[in-house]
Image: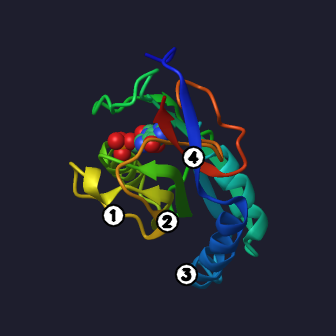
Amino acid sequence: MTERPYVIDKMISAKAIAARIEALCMDIEAEFSGTDKLVVVGLLRGSFVFIADLVRELDLPIEVDFLETSSYGDGMESSREVRILKDLRGTIEGRDVLVVEDIVDTGYTMSHVIRLLKGRKPAKLRSIALLDKPSRREVDVSSDWIGFEIPDEFVVGYGIDFAQRNRNLPYIGKVRFT
Ligand code: IMP
Ligand code: MG
């Protein structure tokens, strides 16, 4: 399946992403103004580029931690069963937390992670996803901030992969099989 040849059509430019992040960060700063030290939790691996750009735009005291959940494997379909492959290093009890995800698709991953982290009693828990595919939703979950709503297309780039490839594209593109 991953051998099937495909091309990538540009969907969201690096410039558009940067501009959106700037706007989002103003909202996030307002929401967490006065925070002691915000824990920014990136969901590995897809959010690594987004989180890097996001934290450099955030004018807040922060620390960064990571959580890794099971992924699609090499396919294009969610397994709908979310496992934690790597847990946070730090504790979040009583802390302000921002969860950073690349894409909310069926919603299984985000809802699982939010439930897990809520159980650890953070003071405030918010979430942001760069991309949202609302038409694919199977679990009722919404992020506090969304970068872009996109149609039901399989996308790559800006940290997001297809079978581990194309994460290093500076923009978001959609996969089109040829
Ligand atoms: P969900 O649990 O179905 O919401 O899936 C969320 C995860 O699936 C995201 O964190 C991505 O890693 C992955 N995913 C969803 N859509 C895409 C896509 O279009 N391209 C690559 N990965 C995707
Ligand atoms: Mg992911």
Q: Position of residue 169 (x, y in %)?
A: 70, 42
Please state which of the two labelled residues, at mark 4 or mark 3, is closer to the viewer. Answer: 4
Cα separation between marks 4 and 3: 35 Å
Q: Residues within 10 Å of mark 2 (few under 14, many from 20)?
A: some
Q: Secondary structure at mark 3?
A: helix
Question: How many numbered markers are drawn?
Answer: 4
Q: Nearer the viewer, mark 4 or mark 2?
A: 4
Q: Are marks 4 and 3 in contact (CB under 8 Å)?
A: no
Q: Nearer the viewer, residue 142 or 137?
A: 137
**Disc 4, SS:** strand
Give the residue drawn at x 39%, y 30%. Answer: 76
Residue at horizontal 51 percent and vertical 14 percent from the top: 3
Within-10-Å neighbours for mark 1: few <14, some 14–19, many 20+: some
Q: Amino acid at mark 1?
A: Ser
Expressed as whole percent of the image width and height from the top left, the position of residue 132 reads 41, 58
Residue with the mark numbered 2 = 148
Judged left or right of residue 171, residue 162 is left
